[in-house]
Amino acid sequence: MKTYDLLKERGFVYQLTDEKELPERINGKGVTFYVGFDPTGDSLHIGHLLPIMAMRWLQKGGHSPIALVGGATAQVGDPSGKTEMRKMLTKEEIESNTDKIKEQLSSFLNFTGDAKAMLVNNIDWLGDIKYIDFLRDVGKYFSINKMLTTESVKNRLETGLSFIEFNYTLLQAYDFVELMRNNDCEFQMGGQDQWGNIVAGTDLTRRILGRQGYGMTFPLLLNSSGQKFGKTVAGAVWLDPNKTSFYEYYQFWRNCDDADIKKLLGYFTELPMDEVSRLGSLTSPDINRAKEILAYEATKMVHGKEPAEKAYLAATAKFGFADKDGKIPTSSQITKIKKNDVTGDLPSFEVSPEELAKGIWVIKLFADCGLCKSNGDARRMLKQGALYINDERVSDISYEISEKDMLDKEILLRFGKKKYKRIILS
């Protein structure tokens, strides 16, 4: 299947600046394209995966991706999709975040051989630019009236838009000019909320370079409840395993709504679409099989085969295998592995031997380890019968957890049906 047709079938295409020329370019011989990532945090999260997966498919189709890390634009802050101004980061924080994000991106894209990917940082061309020169050479092409009609600006005018954020569109548009001029980059991709910035970029390349640039956006990814995908009660789901453990990452996908499974399999796995359609059409209880496949494949994509296997076994050790023989639930290639001590891959929390010897109030430990948001939350959950120690429901609100609760050098706390923490000695 041709590359654009594949992207369309898997649900990646929302808007195109040219619905005739761009599909032809993507279905044709290799072109260079880019996606921008502003380093506002020290890790990418699930929300970044949609463009990353599109970049992978395009590279597989012979096109050359440029991953642009916005070391400069992160100092300004993109108002798109935000209701208030972002927290201003120091240059040192941005540099540190940039290094970490570059490392993460390199695990998804091929930076050697044909159609090799590139990593660039827009601080290299925006960092030393002179303000008056920029206004004269770039700013003259922008109409304030037109900028005020873009969704990202209109939405923020209601709550307040700073002058520094208002400039963001100009900077992103100029990125496209630089990449087209120096790297022969022909089109850019971004989320649905980036449409105004992308159109501004294609207009600027035409005005400054006399060349036609193209743009494509992805649909806004919402779950079946209409909420932004990738958010949990605890916050964002990160790609960094130090921020979101392998097990927690796996469980996020495993707990997705039934109605979202087909869409998520199309976006976040590389399974053939006939298999995606088959799995997405399953009904309860068989849909749980599809959820395990999604969780395993998505975890393998980000963290690798071994962490995905361990996360799968850690989960199924508690909730039962989907297959009676305990096979790893890949769809294209089922792989048998040994079921050893898999509870070691559950997220853990350390306490000192001295603390445990004295006894730790059950409410405090559930809050401290992160299973509950606070002591008050833990009290409410206990009264509702949602807290467990070693799979035994806790009913005594004054209970103190101590050495007597240790089983095989650990204590297993559970909140509800699927949230676990291993308590181990420091």
Image (cartoon, rainbow, N blue to C red):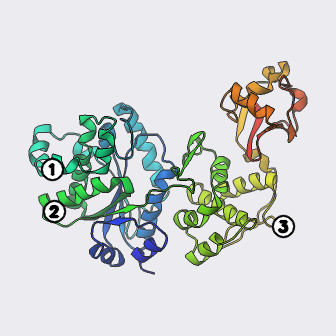
Secondary structure state at the residue bearing disc 3 = loop
Q: Position of residue 132 (x, y in %)?
A: 10, 38
Which residue carries the number 1 mark?
142
Residue at image point 71% right, 71% down: 334
Measuring 63% from the left and 45% from the top, which residue is drawn there?
245
Q: Is residue 5 left or right of residue 411?
A: left
Q: Amino acid at mark 1?
A: Phe
Cα distance in 3D space between marks 2 and 1: 13 Å
Which label belongs to residue 324?
A: 3
Residue 174 x, y percent position in the rendering: 21, 51
Furthest residue to the right? 404
Q: Which residue is mark 2?
A: 206
Q: Amino acid at mark 2?
A: Arg
Which of pointers 3 and 1 lies earlier in the amino acid sequence?
1
State the mark number for residue 167: none
Q: Residue at x 16, y 46 (%)?
A: 144
Residue 190 seen anywhere in this rendered image of the structure: yes
Q: Quadrant of residue 112?
A: bottom left
CA gap, disc 3 and disc 1: 63 Å
